[in-house]
Structures are given as C-alpha cells and as structure tokens.
Image (cartoon, rainbow, N blue to C red):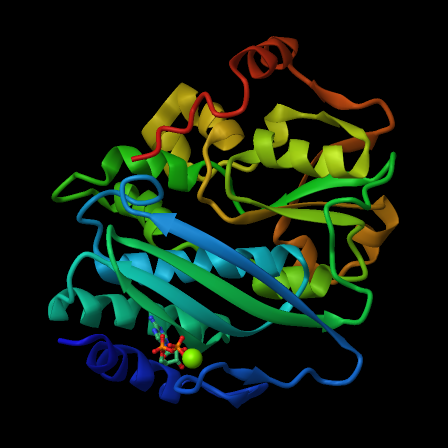
Amino acid sequence: MGEFELIRTYFLPLAQAAPKGALVLGLGDDCAVQRLPAGRDLVFSIDTMVEGIHFPESYPPDYLGWRALAAAASDLAAMGAEPACFTLALTLPEANDQWLARFARGLADAGSAFGLALAGGDTTRGGLALSIQVHGTVTQGLALTRSGANPGDLVCVSGTLGDAGAALEYLDVTAPTEVERELLERYHHPQPRLALGQALAGLATAAIDISDGLVADLQHLLDASEVGATIDSARLPLSSALKTLTGERALQFALHSGDDYELCLTLPEQALRAAPEAIRDQLTVIGVIDSQTGVRWSDESLSASVAETGFDHFRSRP
Ligand code: ADP
Ligand code: MG
C-alpha cells in the first residue's frame, strides 16, 4: 500500500467523520484552514510518542491512538482551552492493515470523545513514532498558565494520582483481575480534564497537567510562578484500586509516577468556595502556596526523600 492509499483508507474517513467545527478546510490540501471566532486566542501544542520510550513495544494500536491524542489534549485542558482540531505526523516501519485499522479506531474514538477533528498530517517510514499537534481556543487573555500562582493560594489536584504509573506493573498480565483492570484502564485510556480546565479559566491562578508525576510537575508550576508550597502528603487523593494493589507503595506512585493526566492548579480559597459544586467535586486541596521557594512536605522524612531521590525515582517507563 502506498502512502496516499494509506492516508485515503485510514485517515481521510476519520477526518470526514469528525464534526468540522472551526475547520474551514480539512484533510487533503497542502494545509488545513481553521477560522478563529472573534475574541478567541489560538492555543496549540505538540506531543511526540516513541515506541519503547513512551509506550511498550507491541502496544495495542487502538490504545496507542487514544493515549497519544489524550496526552496531547491534556495540554489543552491545562491551558483552559476548548479543543478544535489536530494534525498527526506518523512514522511507521511498515503499512500493516490490521495495525492501521485499530490505530485509526482508537484515534477516532478519542477524537470524538474530546471534540478534536483530524485536520491533516504527515506519513513517513521509520521506527514507530507519532507526533500530534492539537489546536484549541480560549477567550482572549484567559489562557491558564503555570506562572500565576500567588502566596496564600490553595494547591489542588483533580481525580486520583498514581494509578497509571502503577498499571505499568500489570501490562503483561494475561488475565488481569477486576481491580488490576481498573488501574490498566487509567493507563490505556487516560481522560484529559478538558471540561474542568475550561471551567477553571478565569478562576484558577495557575495550572499544569500531571504527565511526569506530581513532584516534577508541581515544581514546574512553582518555578514558573517563582513561589514555593507546603503540601500535606496525607491529603493526596489515592484510588482504592491503587491502595489495594500497591499497599505501602501507593504514596510513592502518587508522588512520582506519570501518565495520569490529571490537573494540578492553584486558586484563592474564596474562588474555590465560590466554584460550582461540579468543579469542587473533581478537586482535592493538597496544600498552600508560600512565598518561600521549594516544597515543604508535611512529613519531614518525605521532604528528605523527595530531595534525595530527585524527580524521576519512580518512573519505571516501559
Ligand atoms: P504535502 O506533501 O503537501 O505535505 P502530503 O502528501 O504529505 O502533503 O499529504 C497529503 C494530505 O494528507 C495532506 O492534506 C495531509 O495533511 C494529509 N495527511 C498525510 N498524512 C496524514 C496522517 N498521518 N494523518 C492525517 N492526515 C494526513
Ligand atoms: Mg504540499
């Protein structure tokens, strides 16, 4: 199968099925054309996944399609952006029909779940890797950034942490138990917090999505905002599946493992109190922003171990 037949067979139908939204011209020309509504800023980002580094070899292609788009969409969530469309640069060792059909299905499912239309891309031969550029829009001037946290703001995270990282230990289990499947689902089908991010634009003072682990990503937010934080590790939201399967190690996963694609954000206490219940329900307060840089953990032994082990101690990537 040639390059153009491959695009026509697997990606053109996917692009045609997607709601066009702001796309004036979609896949098939030299460029796509996106129209920006008046008063909106364009927010865009690119994410690359390489076989053997960001996903294991022989990883199911439908899961790969979903995960790659979810990871890219999560950056839009962190900026409070409304999703619009995406492009896909795909490098493949060979044109395998079965693989491509499953990959396109995972991508299509994620595209319709997140409201992202395929607008074009590039197809090349080589080691398996894919880059996805996502486009979204926000009300002019309202994009959430990492740099707006102020002393006194609360530090919050969405959902539960550590699940996707712990799932890595079960990727090769042939008949996972129900609780193992719960963790695996968090790894295979991450749910970027798009609605939450958009609801927080104008409310939160700073935000970042957690792709590399709370300790690492919180530090990026603190650095950009030139502040520090006091964090109560006992407050980190842990799923019962994580606690059941990892016992005493649960906290380490929540602190250091990535791939959850939850949000970490800051906002004044009164803003949280005034927020709709649907927003508050998704958030857990884990600490407070200080003017003194660095992170002070409630548990002193943790302060020492976090400082000592650095940021990627627990990142057992496949
Ligand atoms: P060009 O040579 O002008 O860059 P291509 O021949 O690479 O164009 O691609 C032809 C059309 O197919 C373009 O509209 C491009 O966006 C689209 N396309 C190519 N590869 C992909 C892909 N992997 N996914 C989606 N669209 C693709
Ligand atoms: Mg061209």
Q: Is residue 291 left or right of residue 235?
A: right
Q: Does residue 224 lie above or below 42 as drawn?
A: above
Quarter of the C terminus within the rendering = top left
The residue depicted at 60 percent of the width and 59 percent of the height is 77
* Picture mark count: 0
Q: Does residue 165 lie above or below 62 as drawn?
A: above
The residue depicted at 50 percent of the width and 64 percent of the height is 133
The residue depicted at 39 percent of the width and 86 percent of the height is 28
Q: Is residue 191 visible?
A: no
The residue depicted at 41 percent of the width and 22 percent of the height is 249
Q: Position of residue 222 (x, y in %)?
A: 74, 34
* Quarter holding residue 218: top right
Of residue 246 and residue 62, the one placed in the foreground of this image is 62
* Quarter holding residue 80: bottom right
Of residue 252 and residue 61, the one placed in the foreground of this image is 61
Quarter of the N terminus within the rendering = bottom left
Q: Position of residue 94 (x, y in %)?
A: 15, 61
The image quadrant in which ligand 1 is located: bottom left
* Quarter holding residue 189: bottom left
Q: Is residue 21 visible?
A: yes
Q: Is residue 3 left or right of residue 218?
A: left
Q: Position of residue 45 (x, y in %)?
A: 57, 59
Of residue 47 and residue 124, the one placed in the foreground of this image is 124
Q: Position of residue 232 (x, y in %)?
A: 67, 25
